[in-house]
Image (cartoon, rainbow, N blue to C red):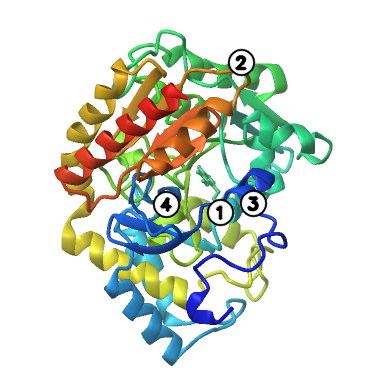
Amino acid sequence: MSSENRTSIPNSLQEHWMPFTSNKDFKENPRLITEAKGVYLKNHHGKTQIDASSGLFCNPLGHGRKEIINAITKQLEKLDYAQPFQQGFGGSFELATRISKHTPGNLNRVFFSTGGSDAVETAIKISIAYHKAKGQGERFRIVGRERAYHGMHIGGTSVGGMINNVKTFASILMPGVVHMRHTHLPEHKFVKGQPETGLELANDLERIASNFGSENIAACIVEPIAGSTGTLVPPKGYLKRLREICDKHGILLIFDEVITGWGRTGSPFAAQEFGVIPDMITMAKATTNGIVPMGAVAVKEEIYDSIMDASPKGAVELFHGYTYSGLPIAVAAGLAVQDIFEKENLFKKAKEMSPYFLDGLFSLKDLGAVGNIRGYGMMGGIDIKLKEKPGKAGYECFKACYDAGVNFKATGDCLIIAPQFICEKKHIDEIIEKLRTGISNYMKK
Ligand SMILES: Cc1ncc(COP(=O)(O)O)c(C=O)c1O
């Protein structure tokens, strides 16, 4: 196949082992995307679809942005690669400065990784290195939460809490991990925004601290809104309570904002939205509008300083990094994205569009297959009632929606909807209308 035709149907589908995919099913009936522009995608049948989940929550600025394409092209022509260890290039410093203008408090030291999973591993390692630098090397436990998704490396899988991601790999998970309960209560049915009940679930951290010894715990990691499991919005006061317990016991609080970061909640980060400043924030996805892999961890200045101060001058302070940490094209994309965020005031736009989007989403409540709807900012989850076994309803419904011209991510039996920030009301209307058609068609099957 010539390179021009690479996005059309290939000669063989067998060799590519697809991630998080029912490979056998897909290869019998493939879904290939051939073009993407603005809020629309085109599939290999030539059918146009609206992108209702910003890709994997990573393209909020829309597809095919010329500014980003030009920035990447210019960067490639000037400097395609620079070693990131013991040397560097100016762009990554500039991007770190731009990122730190949006992070809360003094989370203004930025470590670059190559995606969200790497960002999580980095944050976990920094938490361990920090305590060691402070003479508290016995702090080795990391507290995660049920139904969490923190990427697919060993650390992230261990602190994550989605059973299918964990059970096959139980024998190789990180030691010392303890999980809090998730925050989704039976009474959280069709709640728009933050539930009123469930704050006390944060006390699980206090309980873990007394069961295992708080002096052994390095960090607690949570997604402020649990995204991949289906948009579980934190109960009112929950994150604040976690912060208080962490402070009481010297535990670092990590917010994994790989989805919630960069405006998804209507604020730059969920930390600002919910008024709770963690010690570290992980980000990825929208950092480059999802088109070049890149992740980052924003770290409190004191943590950086403690790790710096623990090593003599001339020594490497943190034995950690990636070949593609601060890759020039990722940085170029990241800087172009920052320009667009500012120029188009997109966090504000997301905040203003949120009520309209959530009203639309909740209007689907009358459909018989819909078991629950949740949402905050520009993200929402629709639970599809179980048919036979878990996961089947979500996948079948996703396929019916795909055929109805709306594209998104389904996890288990939840449809996760996260429109792009460039969406106008007419696009939100189209998403909701096509969801209604797709879910209704699924119900007829
Ligand atoms: C909260 C969270 N953390 C980490 C990750 C992993 O990111 P990546 O797939 O870029 O490794 C994701 C991906 O969806 C995520 O949602």
Three-letter code, disc 1: Ala
- Going from N to C along the chain, the mark reached first, 4 or 1, is 4
Q: Which residue is rendered at x = 63% and y = 72% of the image?
A: 323
State the separation of the CA atoms marked 1 and 2. 28 Å
Relative to 439, residue 156 above or below = below
- Going from N to C along the chain, the mark reached first, 3 or 1, is 3
Q: Is mark 3 within 8 Å of ligand 1?
A: no
Q: Nearer the viewer, mark 2 or mark 3?
A: 3
Q: Nearer the viewer, mark 1 or mark 2?
A: 1
**48 and 67: which one is in front?**
48
Q: Nearer the viewer, mark 3 or mark 1?
A: 3
State the separation of the CA atoms marked 2 and 4. 38 Å
Q: Give the SS element for disc 4.
A: helix
Residue 207 got which mark? 2
Residue topped by disc 3: 27
Whole-percent x, y for residue 203 in the image: 52, 16
**168 and 368: which one is in front?**
368
> For mark 2, does the 10 Å Cα neighbourhood hold few (<14), some (14 to 19), or many (20 or more) residues?
few
Q: Give the SS element for disc 1.
A: helix
Q: Give the SS element for disc 3.
A: helix
Q: From the viewer's perspective, tell me whether residue 181 is left or right of residue 154.
A: left
